[in-house]
Each structure stands twice: as C-alpha cells, then as structure tokens.
Amino acid sequence: MNLHKRVFNMVEVFITNVKSVCLSQEILKLLEKSFPTLKINFDLEDFNKPYPCGHSILRIEGKVIDTNLITQQLRSKGIKCELLEDKTCM
C-alpha cells in the first residue's frame, strides 16, 4: 500500500487599512523579501466606512506563519493590521 503524506499549509487572514494598489505592492515586496517561502496577496476592499469596517484583506499561506512578526512589520510602516479571527457560528 502506497500512502502519500499530505502537507497542509496554514492560511492566515489579516484586515488592514491599505487602500491603494501602490501601497499594497510596496507591502507585498517587503513581506515577500522577509518571508520568501510564504504565498502573500492583497484584496483591496471598498473603503466607504472607516477602518476596521472599511478594510483590505491580506492573505498569507505557508507551512509556518509568524503572525506577530508580520503584524509588527506592518505596524512599523504605519499600517493598521489585525489578524482576522477564525470564528465558528453555531
């Protein structure tokens, strides 16, 4: 019997106050340089409401994700950033 080990990646989602494509590209370059093994992308949302209701989504995928270090790096650049908590509705 041939059993294959499946490697599962973690996925973390953050909300941020990044509004522009230019700033999102700058942040992506910074994070990709610091965390080359992670898959990172932005989804810029509608900003008709103030942060945190109006926000963009930063999605990070990889084997190991240091959410504290990522949050610290973004905040050091003046970016508001919060980990989106995984909630289960009953």
Image (cartoon, helix red, strand yellow):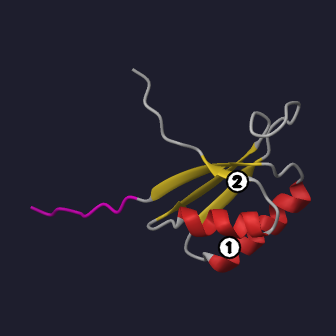
Residue that appears at 76% across and 54% down:
80
> What number is the disc on residue 48?
none
Q: Which of the pair 11/69 is nearer the observer?
A: 69
Q: Amino acid at mark 2?
A: Cys
Q: Is residue 59 above or below residue 34?
A: above
Taking 21 as reference, is 31 left or right?
left
Q: Quadrant of residue 55?
A: top right
Q: Is residue 83 above or below residue 51?
A: below
Q: Amino acid at mark 1?
A: Glu
Q: Main secondary structure of the magenta part?
A: loop
Instruction: From the top left corner, tell me how far across and down residue 27 is, in percent.
Output: 78, 66
Q: Residues within 10 Å of mark 2 (few under 14, many from 20)?
A: many
Q: Secondary structure at mark 2?
A: strand
Q: Secondary structure at mark 1?
A: helix
- Magenta residues, start to end: 1-8
Q: Is residue 53 above or below residue 18?
A: above
Q: CA distance from mark 2 to mark 1?
A: 17 Å
Instruction: From the top left corner, tell me how far across and down residue 69 is, in percent.
Output: 59, 70
Instruction: From the top left corner, tell me how far across and down residue 56 is, in percent.
Output: 76, 45
Q: Which of the pair 80/35 is nearer the observer?
A: 80
Residue to which mark 2 is pinned: 81
Q: Residues within 10 Å of mark 1 (few under 14, many from 20)?
A: some
Instruction: From the top left corner, tell me how far across and down residue 8 is, in percent.
Output: 38, 58
